[in-house]
Image (cartoon, helix red, strand yellow):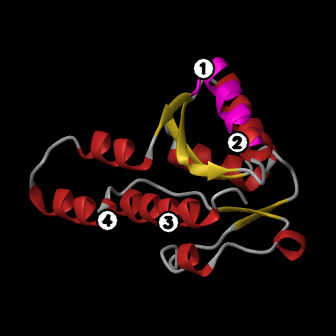
Amino acid sequence: MHDRDTLFKNLHILVSGVKLLNIPIIWMEQVPDKLGSTIPEIKDVLIDQKPIIKDVFSCMKNEEFNNQIKRINPNDIILAGIESHVCVYQTAMDLLEKKYNVHIVADAISSRISENKELGIERMILEGAMQTSVEMLLFEIQGEAKGDRFRQISKLVK
């Protein structure tokens, strides 16, 4: 994975921050018996959840994912993970087709090759997804520079 250490660090911050903000998380794994499961640093933050296993590229083609989306009933969906030009891209396209607001966390997605990461991001933006970063997203949702939650998020991103 391109720049894997930075990716893993940013995913950890994102998942931790989103949990602080009480935003529901749908944790997906692509054929973990063949590709490996989620790294321990992320699993540890998601200790109260179980991953949904998929063998399709787009999460929208997974019945359990769709059931979770229906249960949560969001207008906006935040996407992070791998690979940006395959699974993240195809999921974003299907979500956009269903009229969701899709937020691509650019520093929390990657591909094996950096060019594929960039191409995936470019295509998603061209199709209507919004690009953001971990820090930008967390502080945008937080909305104010006060309170315990603000201090916790600030500590996460430093």
Q: Reading the chain from its start, which is encountered first: label 2 or label 3?
A: 3
Q: Residue 107, relative to residue 151: is it above or below?
A: above
Horizontal and vertical percent position of residue 18 = 40, 57
- Mark 1–mark 2 distance (CA, rounded to whole Å): 17 Å
The overriding secondary structure of the stretch rendered in magenta is helix
Specify start and end residues of the magenta stretch as a single range: 116-129
Residue that label 4 marks: 156
At x 37%, y 60%, the residue is 17
Mark 4 and mark 3 in contact (Cβ < 8 Å)?
no
Amino acid tagged 1: Gly
Left or right of 1 in this view: 24: left
Q: Residue 2, relative to residue 52: is it above or below?
A: above
In what element is the residue under mark 2?
A: helix
Q: Which mark is residue 117?
A: 2
Residue that label 1 marks: 128
* Front in this rendered view, residue 49 or 146: 146
